Amino acid sequence: MKCSAPLALASATRGRPREFDPDQALAAALQVFWRRGYESASMAELTEAMGITKPSLYACFGNKEALFKKALDLYERDKLKYIGTALEAKTAHEVAERLLNCALATHCGASDPQGCLGVISMVGCTAEAESIRADVVARRASSEAAVVRRFEQAKADGDLPESVCPTKLASCLMTVLQGLSVKAQGGAKREDLQGAIDTFLTMWPRR
């Protein structure tokens, strides 16, 4: 799909509006939101990165909130696709290991901004962006619920001790995952975060 982006008046009078690829523009917007968070990302930064005008952004993506939610959809589809694969691991320990190590690779990679887009935006949102916070929280709750279900199955299979509560174990794992993101954004060294992951996994409950 192509969208038309109005140029400056002088240029627009000389021919048809320039077309742009909305997928590429959305990918550029994602990078801005990922670096800056929802509230700190200005419309000027977004339109410059996307290579379009503000009217074109509104026409193709809606307002800033709608653009962010589309960027978050893209982030989950492309950057967090490892979650579904991790949940298919044979044991609960392997599920946790894959989630933690894949999160580390995503949040501390060389090509993308540091940290997790959801955590960055949720922590930085004020009351004026409560709908964004609520959306991010709902998405995170959905992911955590999937982990709970997987751990419930692991317990039923005898992979986890009877004394373990799948809900509390999933909450603990998600807390560590969010902590990794916050520390990664703060500039923590990858080897230090890997050490935290390795230490956490040594404490994993086993039968």
Image: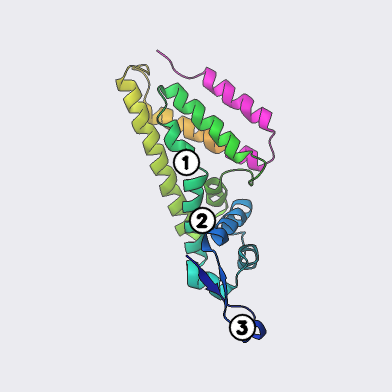
Q: Amino acid at mark 2?
A: Ala
Residue in the picture at 53% in, 31% down: 100
- Viewer-proximal residue among 28 and 146: 28
Disc 3: which residue: 12
| Spot occupied by residue 64 in the image (x, y as percentages of width and height) | 52, 65
- Viewer-proximal residue among 135 and 157: 157
Residue in the picture at 57% in, 26% down: 197
Q: Earlier in the sequence, mark 3 or mark 2?
A: 3
Name the front one of labels 3 and 1.
3
Which image quadrant for residue 147? top left
| SS at mark 2 in the image | helix
Disc 2: which residue: 71
Q: Amino acid at mark 1?
A: Lys
Q: Amino acid at mark 3?
A: Ala
Name the front one of labels 3 and 2.
3
Alpha carbon separation for disc pair 3 and 1: 41 Å
Label 3 Cα neighbours within 10 Å, binned few <14 / some 14-19 / many ≥20: few
Disc 1: which residue: 81
Residue 194 drawn in magenta: yes
Q: Which mark is residue 187?
A: none
**Residue 128 appears in view:** no
Asked whether, in this view, residue 125 is left or right of residue 137, the answer is right
User: In the displayed structure, would residue 7 be above or below residue 132?
Assistant: below
Q: In which quadrant is the C terminus drawn?
A: top left
Label 2 Cα neighbours within 10 Å, binned few <14 / some 14-19 / many ≥20: many
Query: Is mark 3 in CB contact (under 8 Å) with mark 1?
Result: no
Residue in the picture at 67% in, 32% down: 190
Q: Provide the residue span drawn in magenta.
A: 181-207
| Spot occupied by residue 108 in the image (x, y as percentages of width and height) | 64, 38
Asked whether, in this view, residue 120 is left or right of residue 161, the answer is right
Which image quadrant for residue 90? top left
